[in-house]
């Protein structure tokens, strides 16, 4: 049975993150146990015999989501965001002392459903979850769906739309309570999701995974000639604890340039302790050799 | 106003209420055409010490008056809110800055706010007058849903009636719709939606489903057979206090609104408060947690009401509790990985239901036991139902899988309800054909 999921301690070991992000080279593990789980459309019940007793349910999904957050952040392209379609195959190696390595293949959809593009993308990834610690190490490769130049063109179009928005932005929440996002504000959502992807990757563990629920406020929106300066507060939904976590994110973006992200999240308040915070910042690497 | 909090112990007028009062009086003033607040702003100032506070108090003493305090200078730890007329803005801000007082702009233009409020109020008055045009493809407030229920019961009084099964913590009515073609204490199916208030798609699906049931009776053979032999109970707003709160203050509120003396945080997770595996892994005893189980099983009035109703009824044969999001159809247990005795039957039934759902709009659901498919959760509705002898206990997690999550666009209400209906009907038909 999966270990009890307590909310993370208010003032925990999560110190400030290093300013520069690098792909962590994967460690070689002693093989403790291998489980191969071919996944069909039906669900986990179809291959019960192959599930290791220590498998948290949905480990493959967990790994796929983490890999995608990381991929989206690294790509730095709000017009080319991907979401998980399905896990095709996967295999996990569990080392009770160190953590858990997952190798998997999954398909992706375009994040923005309005885009007519039909193709599913395909990615293969190796994800290493360190025991009880967030920020899984990820190596992910995806099929090239769109030429680099074309992608930059799309991003530049988005940038031009953003520049045309009237500042200061007269918005409160995106989407509103009814789930509606004004089409003119869609680029803001996409850019916010890009920044949030970094945060969500950093916070993901074997057991915790996040979705971006809502932009609760736009604190600053500046469109200079060489950057978009975007300071916003986002509400992340952590699924296993069902908590809503407000994160203040400050990002700098320009088409073709690496994404810069700084953030500060507010963690669960306990009656005794004051609310803790979690911080991080990064600049996406410029070398994207599998793109 | 239906559903307004009754005589229960409550907090004093909150700062929000005071603001509402002030804004309302402004609306009245502008309605009478007397005053215009274009460009006026409300600034919030935080004084760090007594010296800074007295600087603010000096403003109050100025004649002619330059600012209007909505929240007067009291103590250094409390914010000071002041309305500053447009003509005075530059001077006042310079004054604050020169004294090192930090301020933020709470309202950028009061007139804009007043215009919006007036428009919203006029709009809601228009809606009330045309209740027959209730939109099944929009999200609604608690008052709108309760009004709709009354109209619905009147219009379909041969099949539907309304039962009050209790009161919420803030004293709102807890209502259940009963669909019955006669008989006495027939075998029954229970459906609840909205136990977690932020899952708005569930209430909307419940409402659409209610309409579907009355519309299809006499037309759809399966549904007609079901209703000719069994009753259906539907509780649409299972957590009315939480739901009202998602409209008024916090769209992402999940729990109910109960408090106890000395408790720092509000609300119990109603889907952890049931008497089955209560207190286990997958629930939390921290009142500030979203999965706080409450002090004891069934401590919450919203849960106790259902337990009493179903236990007293004594003949409920299927229970379906509807949540969002994740696109899953699941059966017990949540509190452990131990399979239930009729696990094989429930697995097959879930498989059939999900297939029927898929055929409507191609949406894929996964299925299995709660603990294996979603996560370990203790003290949940369906575990209690199953342990109380209800063999067909299911829980849905409706659309989507995270793109919009709780904030599912209203345009997806009808498609979601349409596909969910096919799954519900599959489960109900199986229950009909397998009496026990």
Image: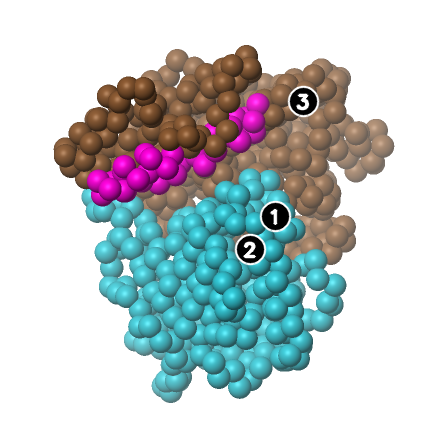
The residue sitting at 43% across, 50% down in the picture is A219
Give the drawing colour for chain A.
cyan
Q: Position of residue B56 (x, y in %)?
A: 23, 30
- Left or right: residue B190 versus residue B21 is right
Q: Position of residue A249 (x, y in %)?
A: 41, 58
Q: Which residue is mark 1?
A: A181
For the residues marked 1 and 3, what is the alpha-carbon distance in whole angstroms?
Answer: 23 Å
**Labels 3 and 2 share a subunit:** no
Q: Determine the chain carrying the residue at label 1.
A: A
Q: Give the vertical position of B178 relative to A63 (above or below).
A: above
For the residues marked 3 and 2, what is the alpha-carbon distance in whole angstroms?
Answer: 31 Å
- Among all residues in the image, which is located at the extreme right? B219
- Mark 1 Cα within 10 Å, few/some/many (few <14, many 20+)? some
Depth check, mark 3 against mark 2: the one in front is 2
Q: Which residue is mark 3?
A: B127
Q: Position of residue B177 (x, y in %)?
A: 63, 24
- Among all residues in the image, which is located at the extreme left? B50
State the brown chain.
B
Q: Which residues are magenta?
A: B89-118
Magenta-highlighted stretch: main secondary structure? helix
Can you tell which mark lies on residue A189? Answer: 2
Q: Nearer the viewer, residue B44 or A176?
A: B44
Q: Secondary structure at mark 1?
A: loop
Q: Position of residue B188 (x, y in %)?
A: 63, 30
């Amino acid at each position: 049975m999966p270990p009890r999921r307590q909310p993370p301690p208010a003032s925990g070991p999560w110190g400030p993150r290093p300013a520069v992000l690098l792909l962590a080279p994967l460690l070689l593990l002693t093989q403790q146990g291998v489980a191969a789980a071919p996944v069909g459309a039906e669900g986990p019940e179809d291959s019960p015999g192959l599930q290791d007793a220590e498998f948290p349910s949905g480990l493959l999904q967990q790994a796929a989501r983490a890999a995608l957050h990381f991929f989206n952040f690294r790509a730095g392209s709000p017009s080319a965001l991907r979401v998980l379609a399905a896990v095709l195959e996967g295999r996990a190696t569990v080392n009770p002392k160190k953590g858990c390595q997952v190798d998997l293949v999954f398909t992706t959809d375009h994040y923005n459903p309005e885009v007519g593009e039909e193709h599913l993308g395909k990615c293969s990834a190796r994800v290493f979850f360190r025991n009880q610690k967030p920020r899984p190490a990820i190596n992910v490769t995806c099929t090239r769906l769109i030429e680099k130049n074309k992608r930059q063109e799309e991003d530049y179009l988005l940038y031009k739309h953003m520049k045309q928005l009237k500042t200061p932005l007269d918005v409160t929440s995106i989407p509103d309570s009814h789930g509606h996002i004004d089409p003119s504000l869609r680029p803001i959502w996409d850019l916010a999701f890009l920044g949030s992807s970094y945060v969500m990757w950093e916070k993901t563990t074997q057991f915790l995974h996040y979705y971006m629920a809502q932009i609760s406020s736009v604190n600053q929106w500046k469109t200079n000639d060489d950057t978009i300066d975007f300071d916003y507060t986002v509400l992340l939904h952590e699924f296993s604890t069902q908590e809503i976590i407000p994160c203040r994110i400050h990002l700098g973006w320009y088409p073709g340039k690496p994404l810069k992200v700084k953030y500060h999240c507010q963690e669960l308040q306990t009656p005794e302790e004051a609310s803790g915070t979690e911080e991080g910042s990064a600049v996406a690497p410029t070398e994207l050799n599998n793109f | 106003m239906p559903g307004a909090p009754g005589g229960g112990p409550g907090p004093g007028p909150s700062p929000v209420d005071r603001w509402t009062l002030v804004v309302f009086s402004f609306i009245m003033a502008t309605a009478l055409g007397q005053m215009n607040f274009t460009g006026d702003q409300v600034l919030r100032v935080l004084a760090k010490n007594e010296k800074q506070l007295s600087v603010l108090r000096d403003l109050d003493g100025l004649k002619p008056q330059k600012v209007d305090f909505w929240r007067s200078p009291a103590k250094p730890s409390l914010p000071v809110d002041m309305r500053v007329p447009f003509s005075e803005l530059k001077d006042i801000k310079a004054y604050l800055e020169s004294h090192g007082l930090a301020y933020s702009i709470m309202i950028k233009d009061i007139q804009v706010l007043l215009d919006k409020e007036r428009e919203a109020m006029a709009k809601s008055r228009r809606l009330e007058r045309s209740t027959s045009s209730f939109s099944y493809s929009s999200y609604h407030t608690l008052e709108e849903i309760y009004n709709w229920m009354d109209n619905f019961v009147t219009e379909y009084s041969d099949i539907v009636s309304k039962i009050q099964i209790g009161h919420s913590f803030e004293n709102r009515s807890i209502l259940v719709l009963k669909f019955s073609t006669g008989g006495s204490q027939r075998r029954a199916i229970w459906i609840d939606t909205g136990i977690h208030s932020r899952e708005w798609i569930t209430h909307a699906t419940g409402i659409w489903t209610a309409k579907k049931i009355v519309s299809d009776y006499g037309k759809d053979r399966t549904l007609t057979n079901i209703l000719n032999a069994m009753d259906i109970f539907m509780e649409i707003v299972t957590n009315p206090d939480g739901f009202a709160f998602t409209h008024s203050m916090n769209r992402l509120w999940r729990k109910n609104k109960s408090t106890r003396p000395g408790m720092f945080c509000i609300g119990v997770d109603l889907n952890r408060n049931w008497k089955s595996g209560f207190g286990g892994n997958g629930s939390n005893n921290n009142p500030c947690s979203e999965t706080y189980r409450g002090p004891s099983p069934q401590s919450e009035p919203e849960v106790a009401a259902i337990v009493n109703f179903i236990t007293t009824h004594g003949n409920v044969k299927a229970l379906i509790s509807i949540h969002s999001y994740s696109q899953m159809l699941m059966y017990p247990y949540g509190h452990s990985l131990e399979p239930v005795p009729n696990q094989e039957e429930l697995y097959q039934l879930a498989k059939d239901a999900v297939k029927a759902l898929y055929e409507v709009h191609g949406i894929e659901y996964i299925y299995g036991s709660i603990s294996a498919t979603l996560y370990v959760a203790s003290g949940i509705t369906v575990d209690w139902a199953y342990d109380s002898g209800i063999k067909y206990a299911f829980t849905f997690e409706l659309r989507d899988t995270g793109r919009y999550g709780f904030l599912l666009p209203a345009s997806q209400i009808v498609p979601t309800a349409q596909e969910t209906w096919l799954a519900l009907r599959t489960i109900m038909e199986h229950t009909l054909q397998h009496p026990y």
